[in-house]
Image (cartoon, grey):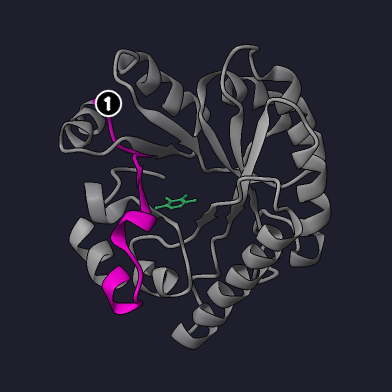
């Protein structure tokens, strides 16, 4: 996996160390996560709260960083505020306000990426590109949260050229966010999965979310 990232980085004139690997462990057990941690991985991504919490309990003694990357219902925000280090799928102010209130005092801020619905898909979560800056400014003003950047899951049915356009549009939005909010630590553009990480890295991704290519196919659902 690192080999793929390394090669993609080299081909786009970037440094491998500037691209973080998030191991998406949904559908896989605590033992597989522990194995991946032993092999040197430290960031794990989960989509389903109940499934994640059971693994977090089993792995509580390991210094893992947990990223919530799936859609989050408001009534489940407390568990993310209490047990995660990152949320990649923030898509509304109300959720941010709840998380800010619920983040335990004394914990470092919850790292936040705003999810962008970059292809305007009716079925997909995320804010429209035109609404990103306004939401970002509001999130930046909340305690307990650290705005770190943007996340997207482009429409997988697109051609490679269309996909490249989507990634480039994300890169442009990300740069605009960095320019407009110089006082925030905007350093994360979360895009790229097993099928498209090379293109995402060529378009400036700083964090790729990889499941299948690390752990193999997911058993059952997810
Ligand atoms: C499942 C998932 C991934 C990983 O997908 P793979 O194709 O298995 O690499 C990445 N991001 C999100 C948001 C996911 O839900």
Q: Is residue 52 left or right of residue 113?
A: left
Tell me if I can see residue 13 in this picture: yes
Tell me if I can see residue 19 in this picture: no
Give the quadrant of the C terminus. top left
Decide which of 51, 200 is in the foreground and name it: 200
Residue 105 vertical placement versus 204 (above, below) = above
Circle 1 sits in a helix, a strand or a loop, which is it?
helix
Residue 184 vertical placement versus 3 (above, below) = above
The x, y position of residue 126, in whole percent, is 68, 54
In the image, the segment drawn in magenta is 9-30
Give the quadrant of the N terminus. bottom left
* 16 in magenta: yes
Q: Residue at x 70, y 59 (%)?
A: 177
Decide which of 67, 32 is in the foreground and name it: 67
Q: Residue at x 27, y 30 (%)?
A: 29
Instruction: Look at mark 1 in the image and give the residue it sits on.
Output: 30
Q: Residue at x 33, y 50 (%)?
A: 211
Residue 77 in which image quadrant: top right
């Amino acid at each position: 996996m690192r080999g793929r990232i390394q090669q993609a980085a080299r081909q786009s004139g970037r440094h491998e160390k500037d691209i973080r690997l998030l191991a998406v462990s949904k559908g896989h057990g605590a033992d597989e996560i522990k194995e991946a941690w032993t092999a040197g991985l430290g960031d794990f991504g989960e989509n389903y709260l109940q499934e994640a919490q059971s693994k977090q309990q089993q792995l509580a003694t390991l210094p893992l960083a947990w990223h919530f990357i799936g859609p989050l219902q408001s009534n489940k925000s407390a568990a993310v505020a209490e047990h995660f280090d990152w949320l990649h799928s923030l898509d509304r102010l109300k959720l941010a306000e709840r998380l800010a209130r619920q983040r335990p005092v004394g914990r470092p801020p919850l790292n936040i990426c705003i999810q962008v619905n970059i292809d305007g898909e009716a079925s997909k979560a995320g804010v429209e590109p035109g609404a990103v800056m306004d939401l970002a400014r509001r999130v930046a003003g909340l305690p307990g949260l650290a705005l770190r950047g943007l996340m997207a899951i482009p429409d997988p049915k697109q051609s490679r050229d269309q996909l490249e356009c989507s990634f480039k549009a994300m890169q442009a939005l990300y740069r605009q966010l960095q320019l407009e909010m110089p006082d925030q630590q905007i350093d994360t553009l979360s895009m790229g999965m097993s099928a498209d990480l090379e293109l995402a890295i060529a378009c400036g991704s700083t964090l790729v979310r990889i499941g299948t290519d690390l752990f193999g196919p997911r058993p059952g659902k997810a």
